[in-house]
Image (cartoon, rainbow, N blue to C red):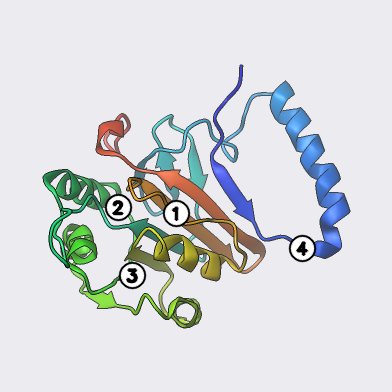
Amino acid sequence: MQKKLTKIFLKKDSRNFVPMTVLCVGLVFLISACKVDKEVVLSSNVSFVDHKSIMLDNRHGIDIAPHDRIYYLVRHAEKDTSGTNPDLTPAGYERAHELARIFRSARIDEVYSTIYMRTLMTGDSISRSKGISMKPYEPKELKQFAERVKNIEDQKRFLIIGHSNTTPALANHIHGETVLEDFDEKDYDNLIVIVQGKDKESQLHQLKFNPQHNTTTEDE
């Protein structure tokens, strides 16, 4: 039976291209022959995040360690189509509240947003729940912003809210390799997670979050 796999991107190393190719072929064989373990998950919808893991709605998860640097990147929620600086729609506010619920038990050190109503309102619930103020960043200076955030030494968990074109571009800069393209204008459910550790390569997980996928909670 075919399984839908979470998109996980590792930084490439040209020196190990041939060995990695052989390894990937072997992994494909093992995945087809064996049960899928927790590193290769069957669903990509995020249920909740806590201090130890990112749990998905099929009860699989992505382990995170205290010393890992983790970047959570999302596009703003559904927006009104009128005006030059539109607010969120009711569906957008529902998604923003869902984002706050997902991260209720998670460590978040900083919340960054562009200075637009739709991005600020997407991050408002979660910043209030964490008791931290959102910090602005310039969407036209993504490379510089990525380097600045990556060099912050006393913080390790970042939530960054952007747009359909800036969010994947910023994720590529933080990850160190271009693996994501612009999101479709109708796509609001991407939750990009980048995990970086001292002794591990940068991992980029392209996950999803939707209010209708609340099938697993912290209380279960």
Name the kind of residue labelled 1 in the image. Ile
Q: Secondary structure at mark 4?
A: loop
Say if mark 4 contacts mark 2, CB within 8 Å.
no
Foreground label between 4 and 2: 4
Element type where label 3 sits in the image: loop
Q: Nearer the viewer, mark 3 or mark 4?
A: 4
Q: Vertically, is 50 above or below 129?
A: above
Question: Which mark is first along the chain, 3 or 2?
Answer: 2
Task: Tell me the crowding category of disc 2: few under 14, some 14 to 19, or many 20 or more residues within 10 angstroms, Cα based.
Answer: many
Q: Is residue 22 above or below residue 3?
A: below
For marks 3 and 4, the one nearer the N-term is 4
Local secondary structure at mark 2: loop
Of the numbered discs in the image, which one, if any, rests on residue 5?
none
Is 117 situated left or right of 143 in this image? left
In the picture, measured across the screen, residue 32 lies left or right of residue 39, that is right
Please state if 144 lies on the left or on the right of 40 as rendered: left
**Which of the two marks, 1 or 3, is nearer to us in this view?**
1
- Which residue bears the numbered disc 1? 192
Q: Position of residue 42 (x, y in %)?
A: 52, 30
Residue for badge 4: 13
Marks 1 and 3, the one that precedes in the sequence: 3
Identify residue type, mark 3: Asp
Q: CA distance from mark 2 to mark 3?
A: 12 Å
Question: Disc 1 versus disc 4: distance between alpha carbons?
Answer: 22 Å
Callout 4, which amino acid? Asp
The numbered dot on residue 109 is 3
